[in-house]
Each structure stands twice: as C-alpha cells, then as structure tokens.
Amino acid sequence: MTENANDYDVIIVGAGISGINAAYRIQTQLPAGTRYVILEGRDNMGGTWDLFKYPGIRSDSDLHTFGFPFRPWDEQKAIADGPSIVKYIKETAAVYGIDQHIRYRHKLVTANWSSDSQSWSLEVDANGESRRLNSSFLMMATGYYDYNEPLQTTIPGLENFKGTIVHPQFWPEDLDYSNKKMVIIGSGATAITLLPVLAEKASHVTMLQRSPGYIVSLSTVSPLDNLARALLPSWIAHTLIRWRFLVQGYLFFHFCRAFPNAARKLIRQGTLKQLPKNVPHDPHFVPNYNPWEQRMCACPDGDFYKSLQEGRASVATGRIKTVTDRSIELENSERIDDIDIIITATGLKIQLGGGAKLFVDGQEVNPGQKFIWKGLMLQDVPNAAFVIGYTNASWTLGADATAQLVTRLIGHMRQKGMTSAVPRIGSSEDLQPMPVLNLNSTYVEKAKDVMPKAGDKGPWMPRRSYFTDIWNAKFGDINTGLQFYRVST
C-alpha cells in the first residue's frame, strides 16, 4: 500500500462488539504500523446494543463469554442490559485507543476488488458525501440482520387495528404504555425480554405465540463466582468464571442435541416449578421441535415466570384469524379484547454485510450462491472476511475466532510475500450444501437464499464449537481451500 491517507491495510466495517474485537486483534497480532480504520454507518459505536431502544433490552447470553476475552466483564451480573453493554464496549475501545480509528457516519455502499491492484476500492457514503477508500483486506463486522427493515410477516387484519402498532426494532422513545393493555406477537428472545419489563407499568401484557419455544431461567449472580472473586486474584477468578460458562454452555447444548427427550423432560420440570397453577404447561410451553433446534430463550432470575405468577402477564397460543379495531381473534376461537398496543416481535431480517454490494473485477458477488471457507471467507472472493458468530453460544466467541484467524492469515501472507488469498473449490470436489447457521428458526429458514452455504467436508464444513474453532484459528491448516497469489503492483 502507498501512504495515501485513504489507503489502509485493513478496513473493518462496523463498530459493534465484533468490530472492536477485530480492531484489538489487528493492533496486537499484526506488526506495529499496520494501518486500519473502522467504518460505522451510524453516529455511535455499539451496534445492536446502541440501535435497539426497547424497554429491557439485554443480552440473551452471559457477558463472561459474550464480553471481550482480553478485557473481562467484571460485573457480578452475568446478564447485562443494553446501556451497560454499550458502556463496556466504549470503555474498551477507549482503553486500547481503538476509538481513534472509528469514522462515524461512514456507510459502505460498494466494495470492488481489483486483481490488477490487488486491493479493495470502497465507495463510502460519508455523511451524505461520496468518498473512496482503498484496502488490502476487508473485514465485514456488520452483524447478521438488516438495521433498517425488520422481518416482514403477514398478520391478517392488522391494518384494521385502531390502537398503536410498534416493532421493537424501531421503538418510539415517547411511547407511554402506562396502564395500557398490550399484546406482544412473537415468542423469541425479544418477546421474552419485553414481557416482564412492560408488565411493570402496563395494565396487562399478553404474549401471543403461534407456537411455543423453550424458556430457561438463568441466575444472574452466582455465589460460587462471588467466592472466586473474593478469594482469588482477579485475573484467575475471571478466567475460571469464563471457562465455567464456556464449558457449561457447551455441555448443555450437546446434551440437548444428543438426548433430546431427556432435555425436554429436564426443561419441563424447570418450567412447571415456576408456572402458576392457572397457566397450563400444554400448549403454551410444549414446542414442536427439540431443544436447541432453535435458539433457546433465557430469562434472568425467572423474571418472565414471575410476571405470570403475579398475574400481570399471560400467554396465549394459536394462529391469528384476524385483527379487528381493538381485538385479536384466533383460529381456535379465543379472543383478546380491548387492546391498546400491539408489539410485533416477529423477528429480524437477515442481511450479510450491512447491505453493501461486493464486486470482484466488476462482477457482482451473490453471497447466497457461494460456499464459505472456515465460516468466514466467501468462495472466489479475495482478501475478505465476514464475521459470523454462533447461534448456540455467545456471538463474540465466533467473532474472536474469526478475527484471530484473519490476523494469522494476513501474517502468513506477508511472510510468504503473497498479496491475496482466495477460497477456491477444486474441480474434483463434490460439496453438498449445508446451512451455515445450525438452526431451523423461521428467520433463518427465510434467509436461505441470502446467507452463504457451508459444505459437508474439509474447510467448507460449518463451524462446530468455539473450542475447535479457536484452536484452528491459532494452529490449524490455513492453506487447504485457499489459492494464494503474488502480484506486483
């Protein structure tokens, strides 16, 4: 690269937790003087946690594994609210000087790889002005959903409703729901998060679900962890706590997949202990899929079930027949009347790369038609990585495995004098496509044509777990499936 002010070794797109983590790895694992910049389309860092403003926004996995491994989460509560997570991200970026590398209101529009110059040329909307940046390597840390448009779903007769309709992704800051009767349509993590918080002020909140999911209570404070903090040096205590959550989550996930009937029974027992007598377990808490075939919802300290116990909230299960001016009629003849506010918590629209268009030598890249190498690089796309975290564990674990593999790959290329690395599928390889996200949730199923495909063998296989992925990032084979080029520019 030349020393032009707009030329970089690495450009990171996105200043959320994945982008800040990637920046730290670039600073610490690549030689001093490596030039990088973070492009952030919005006016603040934090990604999801700064975008979503709905009441009670929080993590649905523990912060000891969701947080940065190089700067441990030191609060007692394992589950944190959105503002606390944003504060943690900002403090981390400031401590390591990463915040000085962020360009806000810089939205990536297009990125075009040139084989002649062996670099990416990025067209960026910089607060309304078009700018051009160049980079040897591109990291897309934009998350996995569309910030501007939620998942579209058909709710019969919703246009007839005379009250207020809100989607959590665009929560109005001035919405007063005190003493209002509310219905949340949906049963995912957002609905489980919203219900207990809304029930504190609303007259009543009903979660209306087409089909139920698994809801597991998670203690936010562990006496064992507090004992470790009291008796051990902080770095040892943080390490032990992080590893406890890592191993515990790994074992529970694989227990659920290996012994689904036993897992169903275990979750049922936990649910029955917390349900009030007037709320039946069947049909409201009997999913039609096995545990961890879809993402499991966590409720901190059983707050969801406490709202049911106190009578401030309820659950209804069934398909919507129609929505009227103030009611919802279900196909099973049940009705919910006198509704003031409907919350459509019906999911996120999956989007790769923040909606930016990618080109290789002028030819547009369709990620949905490509296989993905080691869960991060698209087939036939040089020097570009997509940060895709885990769906069955904390997102940041996968993000960090990606960042460490990218820095290792860049270091390897520099050592060998290579200018580009391109994932290639050999002519003799017969890959069978597999989903890159190992869930059958509705929003994942609807995005099959958007997300790249994993394969059934070699470096094209989907990610398995953090333990294998972080080992592969640090020590695994980084040659198979890649074609390296040395081009003089």
Image (cartoon, rainbow, N blue to C red):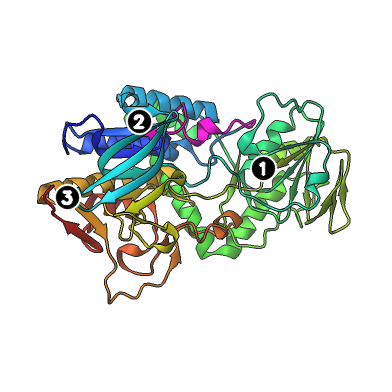
Dot 3 lies on which element? loop
**Residue 176 locus on image (x, y percent):** 74, 25
* Image quadrant assignment for residue 240: top left
**Residue 275 locus on image (x, y percent):** 74, 45
* Spatial CA span between label 1 and label 3: 47 Å
Residue highlighted by disc 2: 71
C-beta proximity under 8 Å, tags 3 and 2: no
Residue highlighted by disc 1: 191
The residue closer to the viewer here, 458 or 5, is: 5
Q: Residues within 10 Å of mark 3 (few under 14, many from 20)?
A: many
Residue 55 lies in the magenta-colored region: yes
Sequence order check, earlier mark of 1 and 3 = 1
Tell me which secondary structure the magenta stretch mostly adopts: loop
What range of the chain is rendered magenta? Answer: 39-56
The answer to whether 24 appears left or right of 1 in the picture is right
**Residue 101 locus on image (x, y percent):** 31, 27
Sequence order check, earlier mark of 2 and 1 = 2
Camera-side mark, 1 or 3: 3
Residue highlighted by disc 3: 419
